[in-house]
Every structure is written in C-alpha cells, then in structure tokens.
Amino acid sequence: MGLRRCISAAFLVFMVSSVVVVHGDPLVPALLLFGDSVVDVGNNNNLQTLVKANFLPYGRDFNTHKPTGRFSNGKLATDFTAEYLGFTSYQPAYLSQEARGRNILTGVNFASAASGYYEPHSTAIWSFDIGTAVGILQGLAEKSGNLLYLVLAAI
C-alpha cells in the first residue's frame, strides 16, 4: 500500500504542476495576421459588405459567448497560436476600435473575409485584398521605425 500511495502522490504532483501556467513575455514582440475568413477576427464588421459573422451562432463558444466577427463559433487557429506564443490577449482587428494606440504594439489582424490576391474580386464585394493590407502594414512600419514582426500568413 505504501508504493500505491507514493505513486498516487507523484501522479497528483505531476498533474498539479502541469496545470500551473507561468505568464512571461511572449516569444515574439508582435503578431501580424493576414488572410481571409479563416483568420478574420472582425475587420468585416467595419466594412460595408454582406460577408460578416457578427451574429449568432458565431461566437457562442468563444470566451465572451458573443459574436466577434470570427467565422467560427469559438477560437481560431490564430487565437491558439497567440496563446502558444505567450500573448495574454488576441490581436485586434485593424478596423476595430481596439486597434489604437498601445494595443497595436502586440500586433494587429489585417484579415478580411472574402479577400484574396485578385483586387477586382475584393473590390466587388467590399472587402480589402492582400495588397491593401500589406500597404497598411508598410505605413505602420514606417511610423513605428520598421520594427520586426512575426508574420503569420494564412492565405
């Protein structure tokens, strides 16, 4: 019985230690996200387009239990990536009110549902294409002194 208790105690210590989360600095300074609906976190909420996800059932399994503009009922792969890299919050949609001031120092999400490489397609459905997103990024980089970023391309 002594061995059984020892093994049980060791297992309990292992389980408790594996649940403890240590918050430190993220592994990268910022995360910039580009793509379409697979990674859009709400940019289309602020565009005059029919391609939106700001209504139920979208968002019902997200931590706020409300629609966010993500084309998912929960977290996106980029949300899990941000958590894995050590960020304590998700990168805001560039067109949202959250993407202002110091909030953009940890990165921004430029993804727009129904976007793509072909500009006339994006223009026809009122989303922005990858060229527009990269142009916005270049402007931000010039203003911020060309900081280096991890770019997660999801197109």
Image (tube, grey):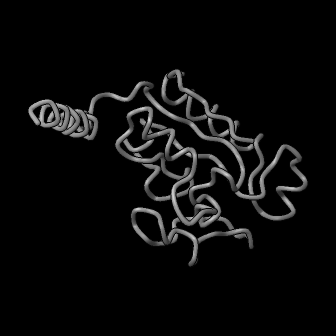
Looking at the image, which is closer to me, 112 or 72? Answer: 72
Q: For the image shown, how many numbered marks are present on the structure?
A: 0
Relative side of 150 to 90, left or right? right
> Which residue lies at the image location 57% right of the left edge and 76% below the top edge?
57
Relative image position of residue 70 (x, y in whole percent):
58, 61
Within the image, what quadrant is residue 6 found in? top left
Task: Give above or below for 131 relative to 42.
Answer: above
Within the image, what quadrant is residue 136 found in? top right
Image quadrant in which the C terminus is located: top right
> Which residue lies at the image location 45% right of the left edge and 25% below the top edge?
28
Within the image, what quadrant is residue 65 found in? bottom left
Relative image position of residue 152 (x, y in whole percent):
62, 34
Image quadrant in which the N terminus is located: top left
Residue most toward the front?
A: 1
Relative image position of residue 64 (x, y in whole percent):
40, 66
Relative side of 115 to 5, left or right? right
> Which residue lies at the image location 27% right of the left edge and 41% below the top edge?
19
Relative image position of residue 143 (x, y in whole percent):
52, 30
Task: Give above or below for 42 relative to 7.
Answer: below
Residue most toward the bottom?
A: 56
Relative side of 63 to 116, left or right? left
Residue most toward the left?
A: 2
Relative side of 64 to 127, left or right? left
